[in-house]
Image (spheres, rainbow, N blue to C red):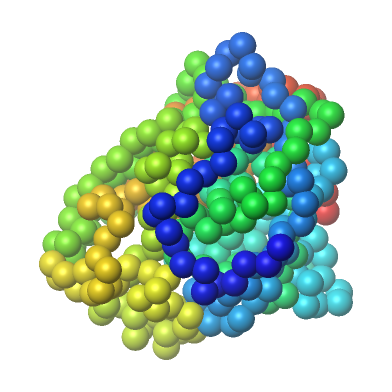
Amino acid sequence: MQITAETPFKASIVPLPLSTIAQGFSSFTSSGSRFMRQCTLNQAITCVGIGLHSGARVRMVLNPAPVDHGIVFKRSDLPLSRPIPARHDNVVCTRLSTVIAHPDAPDIRIATIEHLMAALHANGIDNALIEIDGPETPVLDGSAAEFDFLIQCAGTVAQENVRSFIEVLQPVRVEDANGAYAELRPARSGMALAMSIDFSASVIGQQRHAMPLTLERFRQEVGFCRTFVERKEIEALQKIGLARGGSLHNAIVVEGDTVLNPCGLRHPKEFVRHKLMDAVGDLYLAGHTLQAGFMGHKSGHGLNNRLLHALFASQENWRLLGGESAEQPALRATA
């Protein structure tokens, strides 16, 4: 199946019943079904669109993958390209997006993976090979909703091996000089997230949102929330080669107290909810789902990535539960 970037977001799209999704993420909150089986896509699915920052037209294929494969990206347009596991230690840039590269080929990159990673995370997809014939994932509508829709169209299937997850054992926190921070705390089960933001643009201002990470809540509260930018920043970004594919069709543009998109916002708190959705994607670069509480204030891709590095800096911070040994969770994805 192929879906193009012209397929518009439709708030009336009804998700597949959760009972038909083999690995609905909400099962993690139940201690009785704590160790679920790994999950992959039922079939390959393709989409075509443009990159938000590169402006390049790209074709992306989401493929099923075997057990213990992890989420792995590959540039299909480069004959010497190597698979890039979606891991925190393969992140090479966090300026306005999360960018990964293979450690032996740092110039071969795939950018803006966070929205797709959020949809894969929420849907409980453990194993997938993502092939892209360009430097960046397609932005589609600027949210995770169309990636979620692709996963629904492809379907999911349970695999024979047990899923692993990472239990956070003690608080881990990273901070920036401007008062921004990101923190992980122990949790008895599942994952919950809280995010707050503070922007000078009055139409954004101060916002906060919190939720447990389940597939239902992801779709209802954050998956449809789009990326955003202040109008005054656009020209400067384009001069340094960013935001070349951005438009009012795939991003919220604000100026002062005004949203410039003709259709307005999808939710009054779309800004903070998008930031929380970004965190869902960035934190999946742990290699597995976290059993933890996440709190972020003005946190973005950089702090989210630094938080994972801090988590894995000491074995006292975490342990791996489920189907694998607890030596190093981030090495599951094949290279």
Estimate the x, y position of residue 12 in percent, counting from the top left.
41, 52
Vertically, is 327 above or below 300? Answer: above
- Closer to us: 233 or 118: 118
Vertically, is 53 above or below 329? Answer: below
Tell me the quarter of the picture where residue 108 sits. bottom right
Vertically, is 309 above or below 115? Answer: above
Q: Is residue 174 left or right of residue 197?
A: right
Tell me the quarter of the picture where residue 78 sits. bottom right
- Closer to us: 39 or 327: 39
Image point 58% across, 24% down: which residue?
27
- Closer to us: 210 or 233: 210
Tell me the quarter of the picture where residue 124 sits. top right
Image point 47% across, 83% down: which residue?
244
Q: Is residue 181 left or right of residue 37?
A: left
Query: Which residue extends farthest bottom?
Result: 239
Is residue 162 something that shows in the picture? yes
Estimate the x, y position of residue 147 in percent, counting from the top left.
57, 56
Estimate the x, y position of residue 164 in percent, counting from the top left.
71, 28
Image point 39% across, 54% down: which residue?
11
Please state the total of marks drawn on the protein image.
0
Q: Is residue 143 left or right of residue 63?
A: left
The N terminus, quarter of image: bottom right
Image point 45% across, 41% down: which residue?
218
- Closer to us: 200 or 281: 281
Is residue 135 something that shows in the picture? no
